[in-house]
Each structure stands twice: as C-alpha cells, then as structure tokens.
Image: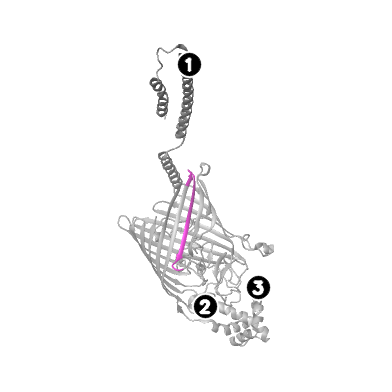
Amino acid sequence: MRKFINLFIALILLPGPLVWAQNPTPVNQPTTSAQKETAPTDQLRQEIELLKKTISALEERLAAQEKKQTEVQATTPDQKTNEQLKDLDRRVTKTERDTALQRVKFGGDYRFEAHSIQGTIPAHFDGMKLQNLVVKSMFAMNVLGRPPASVNEINQAVAGHYSDYQYFTSSLTFDQLKQAMGQFPAELQQQLFGMLMPATFVPEYKADNKILYTNRLRIRMDSQLADNLTVSARLSMYKVFGDSTGVQVFNGAPNTLNIDGTTAGVPNSDILRVERAYFTWNNIGNSPFFLSIGRRPSTEGPPLNLRQDELRGGTPSGALIDYQFDGMTFGFRASDHTILRLCYGVGYESGFGNGEVLKLPQDRLKDVHFLGGNVDLWTSENMLIQATVARAFDVTDGFNGTMVLPNNPLTGDPVGAPVVMRFTPSTNLGNINLYGLNVTRKFNHLDTFVSANFVGLRPNDKTTPFGGLGVDPFEVPKNQNGSMIYLGARYGFGNDDRSKIGFEFNKGSKYWFNFAQAEDDIISPKTNTRGEVYETYFTHRITSRFIFKADFMRYNYKYSGSGWHLGAPKKLTDSPILGFPTYSKASKFSVGLVARF
C-alpha cells in the first residue's frame, strides 16, 4: 500500500516539470513579463505543498490502520491455534476422567445357568381348603341352627346365602375365628375335622421342571477415599429367562415372597438392585477399631463360597445368615489372625410406610432388630475358625414384601385374580437366637469344612393366620430348639487347582431355622432344610476368569416348613395338613458358565 501511494505521488509530481519543459519561457523576455509568469509558479508550489500535507495525512491514517490490523491479528487465534486448544481440552478431560475412574475400581461377573428339577409333593391334606371349610361351617351353623351334617350341606348353605357369606367373611377377624374354634368341645372338633378332611385330601404328585434358565449380572465398585476410609457397593440383577415381573405367585416356599432380604439372591427381574453399599472406617484414631455402616455384605459367607469357587463373600457364617439387611458393624482387630465384630441391623421398620399412624399406639408393631457377634477366632490362608452368635428381637409374622397370594390366609377363599399384594406383618411373635461355629481347613489341594449350628425359638403367646413361632394358628406357642450340621470337602487337581470337585452334606432337625432365604439355590436354600441335602459339583477354570460348573443336589425333606419360623413342622410321610404344598424329595442338575471381570 505504501508503495502504491509513493507511486501515486510521483505520477502527480512528474507532469509539472514535464509541462513546464514543454512550455519554456523566452530568455530575453522583459521583467514585467517575467513577474507575470512568477505567479503561476508560486501557485503550483503551494498546490504541491498542499498535496504533500494531504499525502502525509493519508500516510498517518494508513499507518494507524496497519497497526490496528496487526493488533487484531495478534489477538485472534488462527485455525491451528483452535485445533491445539481443542486437543489440549481433550487431553485434560481424559486425564480428569482417568483420575476419577482410578478412584473407583470396577469389577463383577455375569453368570448363565441351566437347571433341570425333579420334585415330589407328598400326599397331604390341603390346609387352606380345610380352613375354608371350617369358616364355611361356622357360617352354615348360623344358617342351619345346628352343626352341618356334610360338606355338601355346608356348600349348599353358603351357595344359598352367598351375599350373607361374603358379609360374614369380610367382617371376620382372626381373633374371632380363634375364639370360635376354642368354643368347640374337643369331641366336636374331632367330629368336624373327621367330616371335613377327606374333602381336602391331595394324593402324591410330581412337580418337575425340565429346564429353567437364569441370568445373573453383578457389578462391584470399590473406592479408597483415604488411607483408612473405603466405600464399597455391589449392584445385582438376577432373573429367570422369560420373566421380569419382579413378583412371584406365593407357593409356600420362603423364596417366593419378594422381601428386602432376598431381592438380589432370588431370581426377580431385570432390575439392577443395590445389593450392598457401605463404607468402612479403619484404624479409627490409629487404633485397631473399625466401623462400617450401610447395606451389609451379609450373603455368601463361609463356607458357602467354596462350592462357587469364590473367595469369602460375606462376613457372617453363611450357614446361619445369608440374608441382605441394612445395619452396621463395629469391630476390633485383635491381631493379624483374630477379628471381633459386633453387628446390628434392622429387619422391619414399623414406623415408615406401614400406615402405623392410622393405628392406636397399643395396636402398633415393634421394629425387628438384629444384634450379633461375629468372631474370626483364627483366620489365615489355610484356616478359618469362626463363631457367630445372633438374636432377632420381636420377630414378626413375615416381613414387608410383594407377592401374588392364591388364597386368603384367614378364610381360605381363593383370591379371584393374580393381584400383586403388598404384605405387611400383623404382629410380633417373639425372639429367635442363633449360634454357630465353622472350621475350614486347607490341606495342600484339599479344602475341608464343618459347621455346627443351633437355633432357639422363644415365642410370646401370639399366633396369626400363618401360625406362631413353631406352632400352628390355633396352638399355644412354647420354646423350641433346632440344629443343623453342615460339612464338605473340595479337591483341586493339578498344580494350579484349575479343576475342582467337591461334595457337601447338611442335615437340619425338626425345628431348624436360619436366616438364609437369600441363599442362591434355585429350588430353596439348602441350609434351610429340615431334612438332608447332598450336593456334588465340579468346577473348571477355562481361563482364570471364565469358569464352568456342573452341580447336582438332592433334597430329602423330613418335615414341613423348611425356611419358615411360622407353623408347626409336620412329618411329611404322615400325610400331614399343609397350608401350602412342599417337596418331600427334589433333585436338581445344573450347568453354568461364569465370566468375571
């Protein structure tokens, strides 16, 4: 631009001399004439001076514009600079993300299993149907004015006054039913039951399931927040193929009621649930004490982890407690080999979500609390000696849950549609005490264990339509004790123990009960069993994190009510009265693959 202006100036100045050269003034011309010619020259010089000033002003403006343009270019990033900034932003973001992920360690597993089940339901009398006939008999006596003479007469009386029967049952309470039964003389009761029971007899039948597939996904998260503070969690999804309803039809088995303690241990739905979530504060004040609060690691405790080819998965003895609950642990590390833990949890909270404010204070239920001690007397790579003592206070007749109930438990009338119900307990029944001792020992390639366990039912005088602690609805509760022995061995082949074969056996007595409803056995938790269970399995690590398992289990039930603290156990070979049918024998063959990540 500056060159152009200089050239422009030269073009303007050059014509002057040229014009002047083309019109020369004569040398000998008189002075007046010369003076006359001086005036145009001065005027031309003045114009030149004016032009120079104009050009100078233009140069100053040009310089100012160039300076401004230089400053704008200096402050505006070019495309390359933009790309560099974006790349820097990506690297910073990735670093921040990696740093965040490094704070949380992720892991987990996916498991597929296929099961084939063969079961036998023993001959029995249908307890729900019998209770329904008892209620109908009470109604028929009011209609007939005398005891009914037959089941047909009872049914005819109900059919002829069905609207009255519906009104009668809608206002009937368990206390009224219990009082009415108490007014029956023993001889009359015997006659009544003798008349009703034949109509409720169910012969033995098979209950097989040729094939059943399951999916299970678990995601584990651990974070070290400080040298002595960690947070852990596990999310779980467990379902059978073809069902995601999240609720089952109740059939009397403890794992068909969807409750807080079993949401992740029993096939449920495709919902990913929080199975565990807790923090652990270690070395409090540089002491050996530690505190942990949250949804507890209370499932898959020893020795049940051996058959899964897994490390210890939970704190308490799995033979006593395999049940999810919310609570806390205060512990003391006495040495590298000995740990003492005091554990507390809540099994039922009455004051939230149960409509307790709608009841008078004397009608409200007490909360259910768990308190226990868990001591690793000796723990090392090759040995674990563990003692567990626990008590459940003010146990209720079940826990909050959802289910589809086929019969009204009070009247025995069928529920007309598969309605999803929210079950809420109706009364506190007493306390349950649990004691157990586990010894696990590894000899080279051989793992062995033995577990001795005891339960004490300590009821109050209450019963419900489901019964009381160890008694039926119309019986008087009293203290009962039970026991269970559990032992097994596992042998690993080769130097790396890649393949393992194991055998386990457990036997529970008539009144045996434990909190193991979340135990991962598709038929029913085997350590619940009032009878004997034999299990043999084979595991093989195809790779270090991809495991094949084949498993066979045989249940020989001796008494009814396995897994329940309610109702009187009845010998299954005596054609008993059963509120809900139960297996007398069952076999399960399973194969599965587990991918751990």
Q: CA distance from mark 1 to mark 3?
A: 144 Å
Three-letter code, disc 2: Pro
- Give whichever of 563, 95 is nearer the camera: 95
Q: Position of residue 410 (x, y in %)?
A: 61, 74
Q: Secondary structure at mark 1?
A: helix
- The reply to whether callout 3 and callout 2 are in contact (CB within 8 Å) is no
- Give whichever of 95, 282 is nearer the camera: 95
Q: CA distance from mark 3 to mark 2?
A: 25 Å
- Give whichever of 554, 539 is nearer the camera: 539
Residue 241 highlighted magenta (yes or no): yes
Q: Which residue is mark 1?
A: 36
Per the rendering, the mark at residue 576 is 2
Tell whether 355 sits left or right of 493.
Answer: right
Mark 3 and mark 2 lie on one chain; the one further toward the N terminus is 3
Can residue 544 be seen here?
Answer: yes
Can residue 318 be seen here?
Answer: no
Taking the spot 69% from the left edge, 62% from the top edge, the residue there is 361
Point out the image quarter for the N terminus. Answer: top left
Point out the image quarter for the C terminus. Answer: bottom left
Q: Position of residue 108 (x, y in %)?
A: 42, 55
Tell whether 2 sits left or right of 494.
Answer: right
In this view, 265 is above or below 561: above
The magenta stretch spans which residues?
224-242
Mark 1 and mark 3 lie on one chain; the one further toward the N terminus is 1
Give the crowd class for mark 2: few <14, some 14-19, many >=20 residues within 10 Å: some
Per the rendering, the mark at residue 175 is 3
Mark 2 and mark 1 lie on one chain; the one further toward the N terminus is 1
The nearer-to-camera label among 3 and 2 is: 3
Three-letter code, disc 1: Lys
Q: CA distance from mark 2 to mark 1?
A: 151 Å
Give the crowd class for mark 3: few <14, some 14-19, many >=20 residues within 10 Å: few
Q: Secondary structure at mark 3?
A: helix
